[in-house]
């Protein structure tokens, strides 16, 4: 005697060795002996042999139509064995009963299981819904197959066009398009960006990186909702100065300007004038909401995304030829450039010139200063401010700019809408020129002085702190910035470009006007803004570095560079490539010391992943220059 039984969700057959009423000792065709419960037995039979039953039953079940079986059944619960007798019109054989069991078991949407060997046919409405679901899955499978074939042929399926951003940056694995893309990538051996690029879905690698950033930080686009520019403040005193700014050619958000007045017999009076959007943007206003959402201007080669709308920037930027609202810090100096008094004012400042680096640097540099400056506009003012900067740097005991560090300028020729057709020029400018030192020291003086004023008066502000270990962080506690050598440092000099500076300016203006500061100590809004700014500012900086890396790789391709010199700047053979702000680890190089020059061969460049594969060729003479970038953590804090 043999049995058909169910074990672990599968049907099995065996020969009975011993029947113990509640259990059976059985032997399978493989010779394995086991003990099974009587309740798990579905059918006892004498023929055919256990090895043949399921094979013959499966062959017979293949010809049974589920729809017909469903039609033959009533609505009640039934046993498969009883239904087999009815279906075949006679006492069903073991093969026939087993065949019907397999047919019922294989169609769960038609027949619902109610126990061992017992079933109930699915209600008509539930069956129709289940069949519709099956048909939908079948159609999806066909659609996925078609899309996979199209992708492998490097043709973009029409379904992909409306959801390209989602597929590239935030794929939904429940969508059939995502499943098709993953399958096509697996079969083609290409990553999703590379495959979609081959299909023409990515306009350019530049656009791929830009859109990823915009989707995360500017999902509604980079434009601004319509908003009126705030009225310029009225009733402010007008300063009797001739202020001028110093910026590069691309700067439109001019935050700072300077003025100088001689004090006969005493020394000088230096004015540091900072644009005052806080006088037109009220905390909690729609414009504040815009600035709070963006938190900072975003910079990348060839373009920028401003924190504030253009008409607001235009209204408060320190543009030459007009009177501008400003927060001014006046320093009284001795002939030896000692600061004997400080005074802060909210006022109107006439700006007479916007000086640009490219015009000034040929006239005002270390060489021309040593040789004696020629005549040019603002020569005397610049010389006096530079001497003041040297004195301030000496008192702090820390350099405001490092001579060995290079700043790089990216000039993009062409329309970024067609980035692949653009050309890039990358020029290096050594940091630490007299103009750099002048501006940096004046900003350090303003930010540290105003930070100290707010701290002493008990007005809450956001400070930039650097610990002795070099870590820089934001805090509402006025602690020292070790890298700059000041007791406290509160970013206040870029309110058109950084939200933290705008907050600090609100606090400063409130104190100067005798009003209650908008942010109290331990303000939840202040802490939230601090946290969000820190995270967002870091993300913007990472994006800027990635886009600069993209243009560096484009420069290498544009010039057909096959070999390039590099200088080791860190452990594990971290090297900076010649002429470029491009840092690369060189695993193929032997262990080298910092400042050694090496020659590299460019093996491959991938603009979509921003990967550069370089191979070590040989070691050249040690570099004469010191390791660049050792004080990046210090310099980032200076505006």
Image (cartoon, helix red, strand yellow):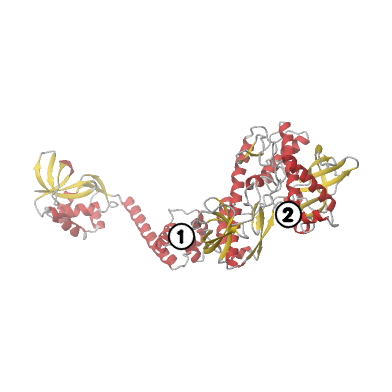
Q: Is residue 312 above or below residue 59?
A: above
Task: Say if 344 sits above or below 598 in the image.
Answer: above
Where is residue 25? Give x, y as percent: 12, 43
Few, some or many C-alpha atoms within 10 Å of disc 2 (few <14, some 14-19, many ≥20)? some
**Residue at disc 1, secondary structure:** loop
Q: From the viewer's perspective, is 597 left or right of 126?
A: right
User: Does residue 243 appear in the picture of this structure?
Assistant: no
The crowding category of the residue bearing disc 1, from other C-alpha atoms within 10 Å (few below 14, some 14 to 19, many at least 20), is some
Q: Residue at x 63, y 50 (%)?
A: 629
State the residue position of label 2.
252
Mark nearer the N terminus (2 vs 1) = 1
| Viewer can see residue 395 | yes
Which residue lies at the image location 14% right of the left edge and 40% below the top edge? Answer: 23
Coordinates of residue 165 in the picture (x, y in percent): 52, 57
Q: Residue 435's x, y, as percent?
A: 75, 52
Q: Is residue 574 left or right of residue 254?
A: left
Residue 144 versus residue 514: which sits nearer the camera? 514
Which element is circle 2 on? Answer: loop
Residue 185 vs residue 478, the one in the foreground: 478
Q: Position of residue 596 (x, y in %)?
A: 58, 56
Which residue is disc 1 drawn over? 191
Residue 254 versus residue 18: which sits nearer the camera?
Answer: 254
Residue 223, placed above or below residue 531? below
Q: Quadrant of residue 252?
A: bottom right
Which of the labelled discs sits on residue 530, or is there none?
Answer: none
Residue 171 vertical placement versus 197 (above, below):
above
């Amino acid at each position: 005697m043999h049995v058909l039984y169910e074990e672990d969700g599968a049907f099995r057959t065996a020969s009975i060795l011993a029947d113990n009423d509640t259990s059976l000792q059985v032997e399978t065709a493989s010779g394995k002996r086991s003990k099974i419960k009587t309740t798990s037995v579905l059918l006892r039979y004498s023929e055919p042999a256990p090895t043949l039953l399921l094979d013959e039953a499966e062959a017979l079940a293949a010809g049974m139509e589920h729809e017909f079986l469903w039609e033959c059944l009533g609505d009640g619960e039934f046993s498969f064995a009883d239904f087999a007798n009815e279906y075949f019109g006679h006492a069903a054989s073991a093969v026939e009963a087993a065949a019907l069991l397999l047919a019922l078991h294989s169609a769960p949407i038609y027949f619902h299981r109610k126990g061992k060997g017992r079933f109930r046919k699915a209600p008509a409405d539930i069956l129709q819904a289940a069949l519709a679901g099956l048909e939908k899955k079948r159609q999806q499978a066909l659609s996925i197959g078609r899309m996979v074939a199209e992708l492998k042929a490097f043709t973009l399926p029409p379904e992909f066009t409306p959801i390209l951003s989602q597929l590239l940056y935030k794929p939904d694995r429940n969508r059939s398009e995502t499943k098709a893309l993953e399958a096509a990538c697996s079969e083609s051996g290409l990553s999703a960006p590379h495959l979609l690029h081959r299909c023409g879905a990515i306009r350019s690698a530049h656009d791929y990186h830009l859109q990823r950033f915009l989707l995360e930080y500017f999902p509604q686009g980079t434009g601004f909702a319509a908003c009126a520019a705030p009225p310029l403040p009225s009733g402010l005193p007008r300063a009797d100065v001739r202020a001028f700014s110093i910026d590069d050619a691309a700067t439109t958000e001019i935050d700072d300007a300077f003025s100088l007045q001689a004090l006969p017999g005493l020394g000088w009076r230096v004015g540091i004038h900072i644009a005052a959007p806080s006088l037109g943007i009220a905390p909690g206003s729609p414009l504040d909401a815009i600035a709070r959402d963006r938190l900072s201007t975003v910079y990348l080669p060839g373009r920028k995304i401003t924190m504030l709308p253009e008409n607001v920037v235009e209204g408060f930027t320190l543009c030459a030829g007009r009177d501008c609202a400003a927060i001014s810090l006046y320093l009284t100096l001795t002939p030896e450039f000692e600061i004997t008094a400080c005074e802060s004012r909210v006022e109107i400042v006439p700006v007479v010139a916007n000086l640009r680096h490219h015009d000034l640097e040929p006239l005002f540099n270390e060489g021309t200063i040593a040789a004696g400056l020629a005549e040019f506009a603002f020569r005397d003012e610049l010389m006096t401010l530079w001497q003041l900067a040297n004195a301030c740097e000496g008192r702090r005991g820390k350099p405001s700019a490092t001579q060995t560090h290079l700043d790089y300028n990216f000039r993009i020729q062409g329309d970024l809408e067609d980035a692949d057709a653009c050309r890039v020029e990358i020029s290096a400018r050594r940091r630490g020129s007299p103009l750099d030192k002048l501006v940096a020291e004046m900003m350090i003086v303003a930010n540290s002085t105003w930070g100290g004023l707010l701290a002493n008066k008990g007005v809450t502000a956001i400070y930039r702190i650097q610990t002795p270990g070099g870590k820089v962080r934001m805090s509402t506690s006025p602690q020292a910035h070790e890298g700059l050598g000041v007791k406290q440092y509160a970013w206040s000099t870029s309110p058109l470009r950084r939200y933290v500076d705008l907050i600090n300016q609100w606090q400063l203006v409130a104190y100067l006007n005798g009003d209650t500061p908008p942010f109290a100590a331990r303000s939840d809004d202040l802490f939230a803004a601090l946290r969000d700014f820190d995270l967002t500012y870091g993300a913007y900086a990472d994006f800027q570095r990635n886009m600069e890396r993209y243009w560096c790789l484009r420069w290498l391709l544009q010039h057909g560079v096959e070999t390039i010199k590099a200088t080791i700047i860190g452990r594990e053979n971290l090297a900076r490539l010649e002429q470029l702000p491009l840092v690369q680890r060189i695993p193929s190089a032997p262990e080298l010391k910092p400042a050694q020059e090496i020659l590299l061969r460019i093996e491959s460049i991938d603009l979509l992943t921003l990967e550069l594969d370089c191979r070590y060729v040989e070691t050249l003479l040690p570099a004469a220059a010191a390791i660049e970038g050792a004080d990046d953590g210090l310099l980032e804090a200076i505006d």
